[in-house]
Each structure stands twice: as C-alpha cells, then as structure tokens.
Image (cartoon, grey):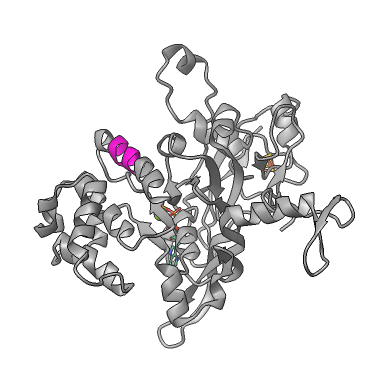
C-alpha cells in the first residue's frame, strides 16, 4: 500500500543504485530501506473488512443488512512494538483483533503475518502459524475451562502444538509460572481459586506457553481493580522483552494504553481515524474524535486539569449497521463542515502541519484548518434516529439510540 509509512512506494529511477545481486538486479538504497521496513513489519493488515450479515425470517434466513463491524482497516504492527488500539465500545476493536488471528472471516482485505498471507494457509500450515499468534482476553474466567487445573490448562495448549516432548514439560510450566509471578503451587489449582489479577496471569501464561510472536491482548485489564491493573500492565511490559513479543493491546480507555504503547491507533466505527507514536498522539491529538477522547482523560495536576480542553461528545456511537455517510464522525463532530464532511470519507493521511511527523496520520478533511484555529468548534445537538430504519426490530442493540445534528 502506498500509504503505508513503513513500506513506502519508491518510484523507479528515484533511487540511486548502490550494487548488483548475483542475478544482475540492481540494489538501491531506497530499495534496501524498503526491504528492511518490510522485514520490520510482523503484521500487515490491508483494507480489512468484516461485515456480519443481519438475518431475518423463520424459514428463509434472509439477509436484510450488515453490521459493518470492521470497515477498511489498514494497520501494520512492527516486530517488538506494542500497538495500542483504542475506541468506544462497539467500534470494532475485538472483531479486528480476531480477524488478525483469522478467528473471523474477512469480508475483504488481507492480513500478512511474518510475510505470509494468512488466507493462503489451510489445515496444518494455518495451525502452525496460529501458534505464533495468541490472544489474552478481558475475562480470564470466561476463557479458562473451570474444570481444568492450571497445569492441565497450560499443557492443553502446548500439546495442541506438539510442544510437550520428553520430560521437560514440568520444568517449562514452572518457568512460565515464575515468569508471570505465580508460585509453583498454582499448577494444581483451578481458575476459581485465584483472584482476578492472578487469573489474568494464568491467562497470560497460557498464551506464552506456546511461544508466540504476537499477543493480541483484548482489554487485558478492564475487568481488574485499578490497583491490579498497573501490575498486569507492568508484567506485560516485562514479558515483552524476556520473550521477544509483539503486542496489540486493545482498550476503550486511552489512559490504559498510554504507557505501554509505542504507537496508538484510534478507531471509530470500523476504521482508524488517527495513528501516531504514543508520545506525539498524547502531546498533540489532531483528529476531533481523538481530542474528545483525550479531553475525557483526567489530568492529575489540578492547574493543567483546570485549563485543559474539554470536548463533550454528544450522542452515542451511531450503529455500525447504519454508519453515517462521508466522515463517519460527522454526526458528532463539533468541527463538521457543510462541504465534504457528510459526503466524502476521509482517508488516513499525513498532514501538513509544522512539527507534526509523517508517522502521525489523521483521517479528517480539515485537520490543518482545525489545528491552526482557522476552523472553530460549534455546538452539536442530539436528535433521535428514525425507529423505522432497517433491522431496528430485529436487534435494537445494533442501533445507537441517537444521532447528532449540527445546531448552530
Ligand atoms: N458475531 C457477530 N455477529 C453480529 N454482530 C457482531 C458480531 N460480533 C460483533 N458484532 C457487532 O460488531 C460491532 C463491533 O463489535 P466489537 O465487539 O468488535 O466491538 P468492540 O470495539 O470490541 O467493543 P467493546 O469495547 O464493547 O468490546 C458491534 O456492533 C457488535 O455488536
Ligand atoms: S472530516 Fe469533518 S466531520 Fe470528519 S472529523 Fe474532520 S471536520 Fe469532523
Ligand atoms: Mg471488544
């Protein structure tokens, strides 16, 4: 993809040749850089869409619409990095995480893992590749079989990938437990015998047991007490170095991913609206949605807290079964303009703003004018949606209760 910052398209002839291969192909400085960047990317998701059909009818399962849960995600995760993916409940974070692991069928798009298109793998080859991609869930109790001891739980995953050979298993189990900060005695216990934080440690040990390269941690601390959250986040950070891991950490809370993430992607209704190095994003959020999310994160310093920007998001997330046209955020955006916003879907792009690096990309037509202050925010007011709309009687939960229109 040409808009992929890690794999820039280099026009032929622009790059200076610096050598030749044995087959006579010239190697260019830019070409070498591109190859290095490609090697650097562990997960490359391009144009990923996951649409769930909405079925109706008792006898004939008629498809009456789709939930556009993921609707055009381009995202690369580099080896060894932690990518934080944030967004409101229902914006498609988990579906995207599952799609990366081929646990959801892609409606469109491609996911390359370690340079291999996962859709091209079947049977044993896919099973082998899956070993390298593990998931840690929000609710460890729900993801761990309550009838199995920790030892059985860990061995089950290892056996599935033929990793239990000879007599080394017990030693490996003890090492895993030590790595996640649990005593050896935990091996004989059942999930319900642990506290929430300890259970999450078991869940992490289980993911680690098959020696993965990527861990998708879906809201790994949302169900935990605040005091325990930091411990689990710190544990994930420590393990990353020790086990050479790459993380996708999913959260609805910007504060959770702030310290752990190298880069952060902000998702809104199925697609990224902003992506940047974590420090840049927190220092200068550019998309109106990111600014609104950020303004909801309290700051410990009372002086800063008093002066910081406060943007209240009007209305709920619109339904992914009936997403707004143009910019998906236009129904709630305080900077919405009469031209383009309602009709033209903005692409994630590098912006032309002094001091903003090319690694910070924003999907807003007016990012430059908003950043300069040329465009000022205006009021938005909430308006009820039309209840006669598609599927509203088949699944009320699919529809946001309100849409928002510009008041002034
Ligand atoms: N199997 C499915 N069939 C139909 N719709 C689904 C399915 N899975 C998810 N959805 C819908 O897709 C949308 C995105 O769901 P998803 O779980 O990915 O969101 P999320 O961002 O992870 O939310 P949360 O923060 O609440 O976990 C939601 O509207 C959800 O109801
Ligand atoms: S494109 Fe328009 S509606 Fe969308 S975020 Fe930018 S200003 Fe707001
Ligand atoms: Mg989720």
Quadrant holding the C terminus = top right
Q: Position of residue 332 (x, y in %)?
A: 58, 41
Q: Which residues are magenta?
A: 229-235
* Residue 106 visible somewhere in the drawing: yes
Front residue of 104 and 342: 104
Q: Residue 131's quadrant in the figure?
A: bottom left
Provide the major secondary structure of the magenta segment: helix
316 magenta-colored = no
Q: Position of residue 190 (x, y in %)?
A: 12, 59
* Rendering quadrant holding ligand 2: top right
- Residue drawn 47% across the image and 77% down it: 125
Q: Residue 11's quadrant in the figure?
A: bottom right
Q: Residue furthest top?
A: 303
- Residue drawn 77% across the image and 67% down it: 22
Q: Position of residue 241 (x, y in %)?
A: 40, 44
Front residue of 213 and 117: 213
232 magenta-colored = yes
Quadrant holding the N terminus = bottom right
């Amino acid at each position: 993809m040409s808009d992929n910052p890690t794999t820039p398209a280099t026009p032929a002839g622009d790059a200076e040749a610096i050598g030749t291969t044995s087959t006579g192909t010239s190697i260019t400085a830019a070409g070498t850089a591109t190859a290095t960047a490609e090697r650097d990317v562990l997960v490359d998701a391009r144009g990923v869409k996951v649409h769930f059909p909405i079925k109706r009818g008792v006898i004939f399962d008629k498809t009456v619409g789709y939930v556009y849960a993921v609707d055009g995600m381009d995202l690369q995760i580099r080896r060894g990095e932690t990518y934080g993916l944030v967004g409101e409940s229902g914006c498609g974070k988990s579906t995207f995480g599952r799609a990366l692991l081929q646990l959801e069928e892609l409606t469109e798009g491609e996911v390359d893992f370690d340079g291999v298109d996962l859709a091209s793998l079947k049977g044993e080859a896919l099973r082998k590749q899956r070993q390298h991609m593990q998931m840690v869930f929000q609710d460890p109790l729900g993801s761990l079989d309550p009838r199995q001891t920790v030892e059985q739980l860990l061995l089950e995953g290892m056996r599935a990938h033929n990793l239990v050979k000879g007599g080394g298993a017990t030693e490996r189990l003890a090492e895993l437990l030590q790595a996640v900060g649990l005593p050896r005695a935990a091996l004989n216990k059942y999930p319900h015998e642990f506290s929430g934080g300890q259970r999450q440690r078991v869940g992490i040990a289980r993911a680690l047991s098959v020696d993965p390269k990527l861990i998708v941690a879906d809201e790994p601390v949302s169900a935990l007490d605040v005091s325990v959250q930091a411990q689990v986040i710190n544990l994930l950070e420590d393990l990353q170095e020790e086990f050479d891991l790459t993380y996708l950490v999913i959260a609805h809370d910007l504060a959770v991913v702030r310290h752990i993430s190298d880069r952060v992607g902000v998702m809104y209704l199925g697609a990224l609206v902003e992506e940047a190095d974590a420090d840049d994003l927190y220092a200068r959020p550019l998309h109106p949605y990111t600014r609104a999310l950020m303004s909801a994160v309290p700051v410990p310093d009372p002086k800063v807290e008093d002066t910081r920007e406060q943007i209240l998001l009007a209305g709920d997330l619109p339904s992914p079964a009936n997403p707004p046209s143009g910019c998906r955020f236009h129904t709630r955006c305080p900077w919405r303009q009469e031209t383009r916003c309602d009709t033209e879907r903005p692409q994630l792009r590098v912006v032309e703003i002094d001091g903003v690096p090319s690694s910070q990309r924003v999907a807003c037509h007016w990012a430059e004018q908003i950043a300069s202050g040329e465009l000022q925010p205006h009021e938005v007011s909430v308006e009820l949606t039309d209840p006669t709309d598609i599927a509203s009687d088949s699944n009320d939960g699919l529809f946001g209760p309100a849409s928002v229109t510009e008041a002034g």
